[in-house]
Image: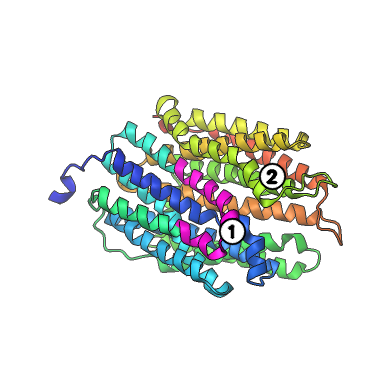
Amino acid sequence: MTATLAPPVRIGRAAVGALGMLAVATGALESVVTPTLPLLQRELDMSPSEGALLSIVLLITGALVTPVAGKLGDRYGGKRILIRLMAVVCAGGLVSALAPNLPVLLLGQVLQGAMVGALPLSFILVRKHLPAGESKVAIGVVSGLFVGGGMAGTLSAGPVAEGLSRHWMFALPTIAVIGSTALVNRLMPHDMPGRSDDAGVDWPGLLLLSGTLVTLMLVLALAPDVASQPLVLGALVLLLAAFAGAWIAVERRATSPMVDLAMLARPAVWKSCVLTFVICVGTSVAVYLVPQLFAVPSDEYGFGASATAIGFFLLPGAVAASLAGPISGIGARRYGSRTVVTAGIVLMVTALIALAAVHTEVWHLVIGKVVIALANGLCVTALVTGTATSVEQGDTGIATSLVLVTRVLGYAVGAQVSGAILTAATPSGSDVPAESAFVTGFAIAAAVTALSLLVTRTMSKGVKE
C-alpha cells in the first residue's frame, strides 16, 4: 500500500522519444504485408483466399490481445507488460522473416499481432509519469508516430522486398523494434501496479471473442459470393450471432471480464468507440480504393501506376498522418476533443465526396488521400486522448484498449467491404472493376462517416478538457 502512494517519477523527452521510436517501428512492422501481398502470393504459391487470411490475421490477433494487454498493464504496471509484449512481437517478426512457407508466416503474424497492445500500455506510462496537459500532447505524439510508422512501412516494404527479399521486409522493422524496446526498457522508469486483485485472464471470453471476429471476417469475405453459396453465408451469419451472444453473456457474468462491458457502457467510452469504428471504416475504404485506382490500367480510367509510383503518390498522405497526432493532441488540449473530432469528420466527409465526384487526375487522389489521412489522425488521436483523460488513471489501459480495438475492427471491416464492392462490380472475365464501384465506395464511406456527426453532438463537455 505504501508503494502505491509514492509519487511517480517524472519522465523527460528522451523517454517519450523512446516510446515514439517504438511506435514508429511497430507501425512499420504492422503494415508491410498489405502492399506486398501479390508478391507474397507468388512466392508462397498462395490462393486469393489464403492471401486474404494473411492480410487480416494480424488485425484479428491484435484486437484480441489489446484489451488483455491494457487490463494487465493497469493491474501489474505498464512497463512490465509492455516489455514482455514486445518480446512476443520480436519473436513473431523473426519467425515471419525466416518463414519458408505460409503456415510458418501465419504463425509469425499471429505473434506480431501482439504489437497492437503496445499503444494502450504506452498511454498508461505517459499518464502515470506526466501531468495531464503534457500527457495529452505525448499521447498525440506517440499515436501520430505509430500512424507515420505504418505509412513508412507501406512505402518501404515493396522496394525492400524487390531489392533484397521478402525476408528482409520483416527483418528490418523487427530489428528496429528490438532496438527501441531496449531503449524503452532503459529510459522508462517502472510504474507501480494499479490493482491488487488476483483474478486471472478471462479465457472463455477471449475464445468467444476470437470466434466472433474470425466469423465476422469470413462473413465479409464471402458476402460478394452470396448468390453462389447462400446457405454457407447464412450459416456463418447464424454462427456469428451465436458467438456474439455467448460472448456478451459470458462477459456480463465474468468476475474479471476480458472486455469490461460496464466500462463500455460509460458515455465517454462507448461514444468514442462508435466514432472510432465509423471513422476508421470510412478511412479504410479510401486506404484500400485509392491505391487500387492508381493501379487501374491507363487505357481504362486509371493511371497504370507501378508499385514504386504508388508509394510516391502516397508519401504526402504519410506525412499528413504523422503530423496529425501531435496536432490533434495540442488541439484537444486547447479546444477539447469534441471540437477536434468534429473538424476531422467534416474534413473527411468533404474529401470523400470530392473523390467520388472527381478522380480523373493523379493530384485529385493525392490531395484527397492527404486530407483523409490528416482527418483520420485528428479524429482517432482526439478520441483516444479524450477517453484516456475521462476515466480514472487506473482504468486508462482498459478504456483506451476498447477504442483501439474498435479502430482495428473498423479498418478490417472497411477493407473487406471495399473489396466486396470491387468484386461485385468486376465483369466476368475481366480484372478491372467498373469505375462506378469506386464512386459507390467513396460515396458510401462519406455517408457513413457523416452519420458520426450525430454522435459528436451528444458528447458531453466532460470530454473537453
In which image quadrant can residue 313 be found? top right
Colour approach in the figure = rainbow
The answer to whether one can see residue 129 in this image is: yes
Q: Position of residue 430 (x, y in %)?
A: 85, 58
Quadrant of the drawing holding the C terminus: top left
* Label 2: which secondary element: helix
Amino acid under label 2? Val
- Residue 366: percent from the left, percent from the top? 66, 37
- Please name the predominant secondary structure of the magenta segment in the image: helix
- Considering every residue shown, the one lying at the far left of the view is 2
Residue 61, compared with residue 397, is above or below; it is: below
Lateral position of residue 38 relative to residue 376, left or right: right
- Name the residue tied to disc 2: 290
Is 207 located above or below residue 316 in the figure?
A: below
Q: Which residues are magenta?
A: 144-173
* 448 displayed left or right of 397: right
Measured as percent of width and height from the top left, residue 261 is found at: 44, 53
Q: Is residue 277 part of the magenta span, yes or no? A: no
Marker disc for residue 163: 1
Does label 2 or label 1 sit earlier along the sequence?
Answer: 1
- Say if the magenta span includes residue 146: yes
Can residue 263 be seen in the rendering of this structure?
no
Task: Name the residue rendered at 27%, 38% in the picture.
Answer: 12
Left or right: residue 215 compared with residue 332: right
Q: Please tell me which residue lies in front, 324 or 156.
A: 156
Q: Residue at x 45, y 66 (%)?
A: 94
Q: Which mark is residue 232?
A: none
- Which amino acid is tagged 1? Gly
Marks 2,1: beta carbons within 8 A = no
